[in-house]
Image (cartoon, helix red, strand yellow):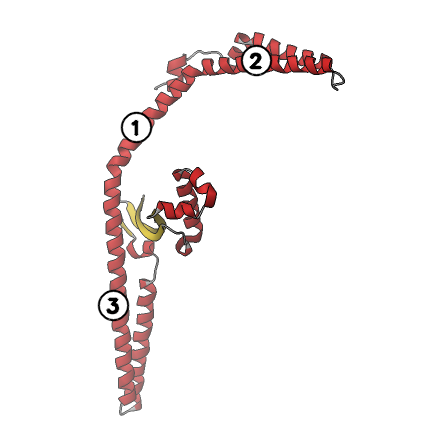
């Protein structure tokens, strides 16, 4: 079995981190404890310039000690930080490569789902219109029938066609997921409709932020717009921003 990277780098029989830190830097811990003792010996209420000077000297010494401790932390952490950066870069690179492979296929799938949803809705709308026309024709037959029996039969067919038209209209208004859902080879493919946006005029958008606009980076502005669109959806109204619905295909086993 492969050992985790950290074990391969730092050794399988390494001592616990806490124990290493306590042993290697017990002198620093002693200095901090000494600082506590020294602080307790200082006047807790300043009554003279001498008191103020004593506290000032202590504050400066402690600032230097804190700076020295921070420097040691940074130096000791460099190998760990570099290892983490290397590890993150390696796996992030793999994911980015995989994303580059998947994205064109995802885009093609999104386009297909969008076309399929539109075609399916159009088909169901045609079926609903045909059923409405059939219902109207049967109602006309019922009105023009010469016998009550013929009129009743035509009225029944009209009611049936009207109900069929209602079903087709409901199906046409179904969610995109219900419209395109299919299962093949153990994978269910469907789609979802999400609200997206495009910034078409960035200066016009930032102008709405007033004097702060020039001090907010573009990534933060886009994050705020994204949050607004997620909440307000199609009712979002921002100068320089186009809001639209986007169809995305989805897959699950």
Q: Distance between the residues labelled 1 and 3?
A: 49 Å
In x, y percent, where is residue 164?
A: 31, 71
Q: How crowded is mark 3: few (under 14 residues within 10 Å), some or many (20 or more)?
A: some
Residue position for label 3: 126
In x, y percent, where is residue 211?
A: 47, 43
Tally the numbered discs.
3
Mark 1 vs mark 3, foreground winner is 1
Q: What's the residue at 41%, 45% (across, down)?
A: 206
Residue nearest the observer in this picture, 223 or 139: 223
Q: How far apart are marks 2 and 1 (CA)?
A: 41 Å
User: Would residue 184 be visible to someone looking at this image?
Assistant: no
Q: In this view, does 26 lie above or below 240?
A: above
Residue position for label 2: 64
Secondary structure under badge 3?
A: helix
Secondary structure under badge 2?
A: helix
Residue position for label 1: 93
User: Would residue 231 be visible to someone looking at this image?
Assistant: yes
In x, y percent, where is residue 165?
A: 31, 71
Nearer the N terminus, badge 3 or badge 2? Answer: 2
In this image, 121 relative to 222: left or right?
A: left
Mark 2 vs mark 1, foreground winner is 2
Q: What's the residue at 26%, 38% (across, down)?
A: 102
Q: In which quarter of the image is the N terminus?
A: top left
Nearer the N terminus, badge 2 or badge 1? Answer: 2
Query: Which residue ends up furthest to the right in the rendered image?
Result: 47
Residue nearest the observer in this picture, 47 or 138: 47
Q: What's the residue at 41%, 50% (across, down)?
A: 229
Q: Is residue 159 above or below residue 88?
A: below
Nearer the N terminus, badge 1 or badge 3? Answer: 1
């Amino acid at each position: 079995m492969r050992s985790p990277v950290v074990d391969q780098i730092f050794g399988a029989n390494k001592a616990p981190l806490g124990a290493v830190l306590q042993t290697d830097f017990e002198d620093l811990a002693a200095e901090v404890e000494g600082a506590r003792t020294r602080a307790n010996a200082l006047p807790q209420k300043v009554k003279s310039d001498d008191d103020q000077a004593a506290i000032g000297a202590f504050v400066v010494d402690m600032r230097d000690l804190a700076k020295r401790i921070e420097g040691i932390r940074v130096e000791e952490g460099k190998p760990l930080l570099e290892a983490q950066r290397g590890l993150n870069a390696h796996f992030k690179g793999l994911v980015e490569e995989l994303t580059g492979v998947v994205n064109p296929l995802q885009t093609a799938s999104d386009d297909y789902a969008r076309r399929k949803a539109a075609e399916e809705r159009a088909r169901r709308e045609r079926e609903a219109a045909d059923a409405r026309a059939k219902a109207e024709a049967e109602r006309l037959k019922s009105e023009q029938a010469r016998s009550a029996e013929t009129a009743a039969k035509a009225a029944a067919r009209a009611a049936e066609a009207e109900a069929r038209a209602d079903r087709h209209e409901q199906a046409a208004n179904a969610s995109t997921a219900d419209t395109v859902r299919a299962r093949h080879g153990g994978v269910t493919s469907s789609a979802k409709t999400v609200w997206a946006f495009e910034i078409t005029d960035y200066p016009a958008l930032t102008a709405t932020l007033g004097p702060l606009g020039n001090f907010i980076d573009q990534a933060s502005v886009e994050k705020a717009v994204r949050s607004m669109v997620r909440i307000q959806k199609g009712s979002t109204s921002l100068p320089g921003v186009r809001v639209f619905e986007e169809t995305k295909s989805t897959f699950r086993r």
